[in-house]
Amino acid sequence: MGRLYSHNSLKEAKEQFEIMFINDVLQDNEYSLRKSAETLGMHYSGLHRKMNHLGMPKVYKKVIRDEK
């Protein structure tokens, strides 16, 4: 069975997982940081700090596509 990861360190693998997990929660909550923090069981400011530490953008905007 092949590896599910490509990182050589536990720290890098953990950070990559956290980024993917937070992104999934943000999508599920329509990019609301407050709702996402609540879902994650974190304080709003704690989520901001975590995202900053991981190098994630501070502002997420929902992409609106015109349906024609």
Image (spheres, rainbow, N blue to C red):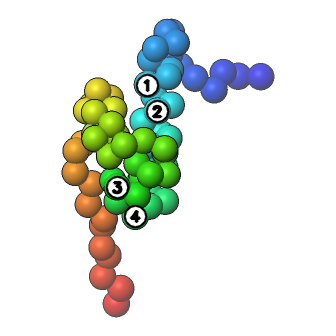
- Is residue 30 found left or right of 8 in the rendered image? left
Mark 3 or mark 1: whose residue is earlier in sequence: 1
For the N terminus, which image quadrant?
top right
Q: Which disc number belongs to residue 18?
A: 2
Q: Quadrant of residue 64?
A: bottom left
Mark identifier at residue 15: 1
Residue 31 appears in view: no
**Which of the marked residues, 2 or 3, is nearer the chain's N terminus?**
2
Disc 4 secondary structure class: loop
Tell me the amino acid under the disc marked 2.
Glu
Binning the other alpha carbons within 10 Å of mark 3 as few (below 14), some (14 to 19) or many (20 upward) gives some
* Whole-percent x, y for residue 2 in the image: 70, 22
- Determine whether the residue tagged by mark 2 lies in a helix, strand or loop: helix
Residue 21 position in % (x across, y down): 50, 41
Instruction: Say which residue label 4 marks.
Output: 30
Q: Which residue is mark 3?
A: 34
Give the CA separation, mark 3 to mark 4: 11 Å
Q: Is residue 6 above or below residue 52?
A: above
Residue drawn at 22 percent across, 44 percent down: 58
Q: Quadrant of the C terminus?
A: bottom left
In depth, the one of 61 and 2 nearer the eye is 61
**How far, Cα to Cα, is label 3 from label 1?**
21 Å
**Residue at 32% over, 46% down:** 44
Q: Number of labelled discs?
A: 4
Q: Marks 1 and 2: CB-CB under 8 Å?
A: yes
